[in-house]
Image: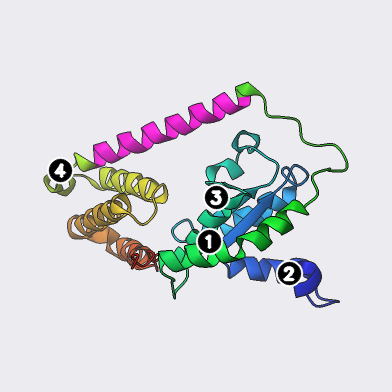
Amino acid sequence: MSQHDIDPGSRWAAKLNEELKNTNFGIICLTPENLHQDWILYEAGALAKDTDISRVVPIRWQLSPGDIGQPLSQFNNLAFDEDGLLALNKLINKNIEKQLFQDKIKTTYDAFLPEVKAQMKEVPVDFSGSLPAPREDRAILEEILQYTKNQFNFSTRLAKIRKTSDKIIREMNKFDLNAFIQDCLEGMQETVNGMEHKFYLERIKFAATTMQENFPDLRESVTALLDTVSKIGTKPKAKDAEPEM
């Protein structure tokens, strides 16, 4: 907390920006009082700067999932309860270098649970000031509709790119190749390090190499693109938790 971790006299905003820039895992504690505060959105955005490896985990206190609107609703959130805290511990373990075995996480969690539950009971539930009004059904439905459209667009793009064979790519002109690469880049931004992400990277590399071979005047700019894509492909991934013993 800035009250304890930032030295007196320091420019707190600069210090906070520096810490957020160097952090790829963040827990956003959401309450009825701070749900619509601008600084919550600012910090969440700063933490989510790197879509490949960043993890932003909102924790809900006295809030239901339907209370959280965009842009925070794009992050899977957890309730501030026994199940939510256990899931949070497992996720943190999955994203650290030296991971614990799953059974050890549960054993340790159960050992500290009574103390945690006692502290949870001390959290005040009577809030001062006006609380945010419940979200209207229409707003929630529109958000669901937009999410469905995004999923449809993602599936359609992936299907179209899968149907584009190597032969078709080799016969494309420079404009079609550029459009194809842009489609792949957009699809890659919507995925996390999984099979789809790897597929998009491979298609980008193949299309860019084809562009280099067929259009020598673009060789320099395509080389820069391939260099950038290679760096994306070698970013460190969140390690999977070790198997249970």
Residue pointed to by mark 1: 89
Relative image position of residue 187 (x, y in whole percent): 36, 46
Residue pointed to by mark 3: 83
In the image: residue 202, left or right of residue 183: left
Please say if 32 is above or below 16: above
Relative image position of residue 216 (x, y in whole percent): 22, 61
Q: Separation of disc 3 and disc 1 at Cα?
A: 10 Å
Residue pointed to by mark 4: 168
Image point (42%, 65%), residue name: 103
Q: Is residue 158 magenta?
A: yes
Residue pointed to by mark 2: 14
Is residue 95 in sight in this rendering? no
CB within 8 Å, label 1 to label 4? no
Relative image position of residue 40 (x, y in whole percent): 70, 51
Image point (61%, 65%), residue name: 112
Q: Nearer the viewer, mark 2 or mark 1?
A: 1
